[in-house]
Image: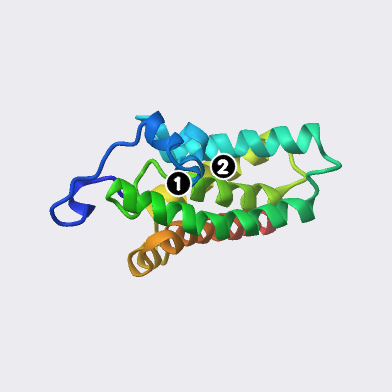
Amino acid sequence: MTDSVSDAPVGRLPIRPTLAFMLAHPAHLLALGFGSGLSRVVPGTMGTLFGWLCFRLLSTYWPGIFTAPVWGALIVAGFAVGIYACDKTGRALGVPDHGAMVWDEIIAIWLVLLMVRPTNFAAELTAVLLFRVLDMTKPPPIRQFERRFKGGFGVMADDILAAFFTLLLLALWRFL
């Protein structure tokens, strides 16, 4: 994720999103993770933690509603809507993949948690930490994918790719 002035369009400096900016449009509210992306420190991690908290709370208190098929549908719909929301918000902020946009982390961590359940807290924590490491460091091919695909699709898809590699590494770990 980038959050630097050098990534802004020529002649335009990126803006730092505020509560007023987030509430100005539903796309901003979603892209900024309902406020979790407004954190001044590690907004991507805050978005991931918010996504984890939502997943845990909804799955714990409404397990009959938030079943695997429902989570799958939410993830697919969230990805599709996220393309629009992140594209619109990135344009408004002046940076296509502004660090405050965390909807991509939320959807990706939901995918990871859906695939590792049923599980325990330690397993979830391991999955979350591994996802954050992969999302922040963007090892190949994630970095190449991020550089090639721009706009809302690029924002959303590189985190899904990080989620895929998280799940792959967890599966290899369990296998060995």
Label 2: which residue? 128
Residue visible at 40% across and 67% down in the picture: 145
Answer whether residue 159 is visible to the viewer in this image.
no
- Count of numbered marks: 2
Residue 9, percent from left and from top: 20, 56
- Whether 135 is drawn above or below 34: the answer is below
Q: Quadrant of residue 51?
A: top right
Residue visible at 52% across and 35% down in the picture: 34
Other-residue count near label 1 (Cα within 10 Å), few / some / many at <14 / 14–19 / ≥20: some
Q: In this orientation, which residue lies closer to the viewer: 81 or 58? A: 81
Amino acid type at image mark 2: Val
Answer whether residue 48 is visible to the viewer in this image.
yes
Between the C-alphas of marks 1 and 2, the distance is: 9 Å
- Identify the disc placed on residue 133: 1
Other-residue count near label 2 (Cα within 10 Å), few / some / many at <14 / 14–19 / ≥20: many
Amino acid type at image mark 1: Val
